[in-house]
Amino acid sequence: MMADVEAMFHQVRAQHCDSLCFLWWPGNDLSKEPDEYQMMVHLFGSVSSPTCANFALRKTVDDNSDQFSHDTITTVKRNFYVDDCLKSSKSEQAAIATAEELRALLSKGGFRLTKWLSNSRKVIESIPITKRSKLVKEIRFGELPTELALGVLWNVESDAFGFTISAKNKPCTRRGILSVVSSVYDPLGFAAPFILLAKHILQELCRLNIGWDDPIPEEFAKRWGTWLNDLPNLENLKIQRCFQSGDFGEVVSAELHHFFDASHRGYGAVSYLCLTNDKQDRSCSFVMGKSRLSPLKTVTIPRLELSAALQATKLDKSIKKEIDIPINESVFWTDSTCFLSYIASTDKRFHTFVANRVSSIREASFPSQWNYVDTKSNPADDASRGLQVEELLQNKRWLVVREGSEFQLRSKECWPEQSNSSDRVIEVTDPELKKNEDFRCKCNHS
């Protein structure tokens, strides 16, 4: 369910009114002397308003925490983004109770929760009509609407995320291309492999020193036209909001599986949540993906692999912080044996670029968490090379389905066989080893 605090900033009185002064000319007559006014409440557009309003919201919770349930208190502290509330409940009864308590709790601080919307008609009917979203004032007939949840398109009826594409005609220039690419809002990386293709065109134009408003070469114009014609097909991409189906049963363990990869075009990482129920059935769902371009300055593939691995550890930390499901284990997968040898090494001295990233990765994980997977089974390969929309829709690697042959859906005994850490040896000729270390290794070898 989703709700919004009505005029949130205007519900919080301002203490430093002198900083919120403004001039007003009566009757819009600039020839007269203006009157000086002060805003007595926080206003929209002020940098301080979100922080002050959020403080007041949390103060309301702290002052009344003994009167409401723990779930309601936690909802305000963890499920609000400024004035937007997004909350999932296990049952309709729990959702109705939480919604009622939320309205009662926030009203004690002068906050009014409105624009309520839910994928359950029963929950919507429990909300007073005046507090509902205008899209569901009357829900007896027709399907539930499509709405934006923090900028992400949410089809309430099918309970799935998707995209709405309304790309305007822009000139075929760097500025026009950037405008169109930036209009595709995808914070969770559902379409990251597809967007990478357009970003790569922009990078190539930058490499050629093409001006922002200069016509682009015909070769790039054709590539851009192909991508632009494919863009509307992104509306066919649907991602289920829930990590598990309603009849999955009780979850007994949860794992995060992170994959990463790199190529000369780009590098990226993608994370999946794998759940096991009391019947030992497994479910695997896409959580988040990241895809970045390789730097303009040439960087070796092993170094890009390290950057991708570091991105995977950041995803792991971010997801664990935000997700409300206890995670039993985090597993990292790569098709780079070179990277695995870097992580397993404890007695080698690397150059600064590699040493810093290896150190950061080891601080966020243990070497035993890093495993090898073949390229064919590595979904992050899509993040490093890019995909057309049709490939993205038909691909079974990037947006993993809950039923299939992916090894994440099988028990640990069926995972790819791993070599011992002692077998992950760095060649003495590896260019990332410092010279004095190379010399010592060669001497010992001879």
Image: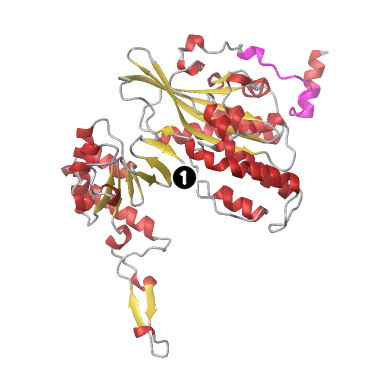
Quadrant where the C terminus sits is top right
**Farthest residue in the top direction?**
413
| 238 over 244 or under it: above or below | below
Residue 77 in percent (x, y) is at 31, 44
Evaluate whether residue 364 shows in this view.
Answer: no
Q: Which residue is mark 1?
A: 164
* Along the line of sight, the residue nearer the viewer: 375 or 184: 184
**Does residue 287 appear to the left or right of 363 in the view shown?**
left
Colouring rule applied to residues: secondary structure
Residue that appears at 58% across and 53% down: 179
Residue 17 in percent (x, y) is at 33, 71
| 76 over 260 or under it: above or below | below
Element at label 1 = loop
Is 385 a magenta residue? no
Residue type at the position of mark 1: Thr
**Does residue 180 appear to the left or right of 205 in the view shown?**
left
Where does the magenta region start and end? 421-439
| 430 over 35 or under it: above or below | above
Residue that appears at 52% across and 39% down: 234
Residue 410 in percent (x, y) is at 46, 13
Q: Report the number of numbered marks.
A: 1
